[in-house]
């Protein structure tokens, strides 16, 4: 079939991204009326009124194109983080930013270095540019070794993409490791890209957020999203804090109207909601503690994370995932993200977490050691 040879060689062996199942899809498939979705690390709590009003207001102007520059949003982000507007780029989620950013930076046969396991999108975005991805396995404790990462960098390495905290392990690189790594990369002319999708959940002072790094060394790209703690996953808004020359390159390849007008308005309103963010962090961490305690009391092994998800050790994650689906609960086999033997479970509303725990308890009784 000649059409098969049309496909770009660099993506030939790449697996497409496997998203979590949607509530509607599961209801349709199994005829269920109630479904609990704990598979995509979303914020399950209602949005603040100010964000909902901003969405209402913006919907009155839907006949007009969005502001292509997303100037007000970029300005609001810049002010919040103490950088200039020219150091802020935006896109349709971290996903949108990542694809366009890589397109602006990577040539055929360049290399990017990532950890294994990590969020699968970096590999996909690199492959789409014809670049190669070098994967560095985490150690037996799921920690990223800075020494291993440094050893994996070659003449061809252009980017080191660090997910910090990492999805799916839920761990972050300690402050000193981050400093050692960033100065090594700077000396080698390798750009550090840090995806901080879960940064707002972290309370540990050992966590060196990339914003601080950005101020310290400059040659670093920080990716953040409105999809997690801000609760705007459905609107698709993400941003990057980048050195100015990268903003100029990004402007040439980004989708001009990538961030729609409702998303821009909602994100601006969300940025003003410090109390809401604080409240979501507290509620999430409290619920995480409750869920973890209940699971440990059931005899399960739970991995600590600094994020809004946990990892539960199981013998057969695919089987457990399927059994939970039949009961209307969507979680994520961590093997979808390259980590075998665990379920990745997002922290939901209290009633959702309780339903998950009671269902799991029921399944464990029924299936015993087989899961
Ligand atoms: C590490 C990481 N980065 C980015 C994203 C997605 O962000 P966005 O919705 O902004 O594309 C996720 C979502 O699960 C994630 O886990």
Image (cartoon, rainbow, N blue to C red):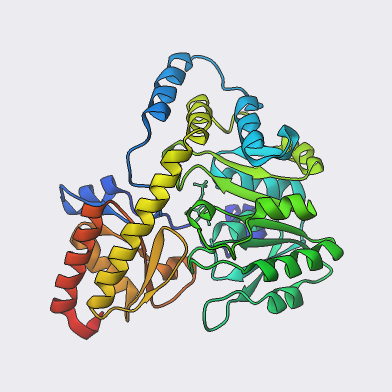
x 51%, y 26%: residue: 265
Side of 337 relative to 215 (left or right): left
Question: Dividing the picture into quarters, in which one does residue 126 lie?
Answer: bottom right
Identity of the residue drawn at 15% across and 50% down: 31
Q: Is residue 110 left or right of residue 126?
A: right
Please, is residue 141 above or below residue 50 in the view? Answer: below
Give the image location of residue 367, x and y in percent. Answer: 17, 79
Residue at coordinates 45% horizontally, 36% vertically from top-left? 235
* 185 is higher (above) or lower (below) than 63: below
Quarter in which the C terminus is drawn: bottom left
Instruction: Give coordinates of residue 345: x percent, y percent.
Output: 35, 63
Q: Compared with residue 47, is residue 337 higher up or lower down, i.e. above or below?
A: below
Is residue 144 visible to the viewer in this orientation of the structure?
yes
Closer to the camera, 322 or 366?
Answer: 366
How many tags in the picture? 0
Q: Is residue 28 above or below residue 149?
A: above
Percent of width and height locating residue 230: 45, 42
| Quarter of image, res 76 | top right
Expressed as whole percent of the image width and height from the top left, the position of residue 249 reads 78, 40
The answer to whether residue 231 is visible is: no
The residue closer to the viewer here, 52 or 154, is 52
Query: Which residue is pictured at 84% across the width and 61% down the height?
Result: 189
Residue 159 or residue 31, whichever sits in front:
159
Is 350 displayed left or right of 126 in the figure? left
Q: Quadrant of the N terminus?
A: bottom right
């Amino acid at each position: 079939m000649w059409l098969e040879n049309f496909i770009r060689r660099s993506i030939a062996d790449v697996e497409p991204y496997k998203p979590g199942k949607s509530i509607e899809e599961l209801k349709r498939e199994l005829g269920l009326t109630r479904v609990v979705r704990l598979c995509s690390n979303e914020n399950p709590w209602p949005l603040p009124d100010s964000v909902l009003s901003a969405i209402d207001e913006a919907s009155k102007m839907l006949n007009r194109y969005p502001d292509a520059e997303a100037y007000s949003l970029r300005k609001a982000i810049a002010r919040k983080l103490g950088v200039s507007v020219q150091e802020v780029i935006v896109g349709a989620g971290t996903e949108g930013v990542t694809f366009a950013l890589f397109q602006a930076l990577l040539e055929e046969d360049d290399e990017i270095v990532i950890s294994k396991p990590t969020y699968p999108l970096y590999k996909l975005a690199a492959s789409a540019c014809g670049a190669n991805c070098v994967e560095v396995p985490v150690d037996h404790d799921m920690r990223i070794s800075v020494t291993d990462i440094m050893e994996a960098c070659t003449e061809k390495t252009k980017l080191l993409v660090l997910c910090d905290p990492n999805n799916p392990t839920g761990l972050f690189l300690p402050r000193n490791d981050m400093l050692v790594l960033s100065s090594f990369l700077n000396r080698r002319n390798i750009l550090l890209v840090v995806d901080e999708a879960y940064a707002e959940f972290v309370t540990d002072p050992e966590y060196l957020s990339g914003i601080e790094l950005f101020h310290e060394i400059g040659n670093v790209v920080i990716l953040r999203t409105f999809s997690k703690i801000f609760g705007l996953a459905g609107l698709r808004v993400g941003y990057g804090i980048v050195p100015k020359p990268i903003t100029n390159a990004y402007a040439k390849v980004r989708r001009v109207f990538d961030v729609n007008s409702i998303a821009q308005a909602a994100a601006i309103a969300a940025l003003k909601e410090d109390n809401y963010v604080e409240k979501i962090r507290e509620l999430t961490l409290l619920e995480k503690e409750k869920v973890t305690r209940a699971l440990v009391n059931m005899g399960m092994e739970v991995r600590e994370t600094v994020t809004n998800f946990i990892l539960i050790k199981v013998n057969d994650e695919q089987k457990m995932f399927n059994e939970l689906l039949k009961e209307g609960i969507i979680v994520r086999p961590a093997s979808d993200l390259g980590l075998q033997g665990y379920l990745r479970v997002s922290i939901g509303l209290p009633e959702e977490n309780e339903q998950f725990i009671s269902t799991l308890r029921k399944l464990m009784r029924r299936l015993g050691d087989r899961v």
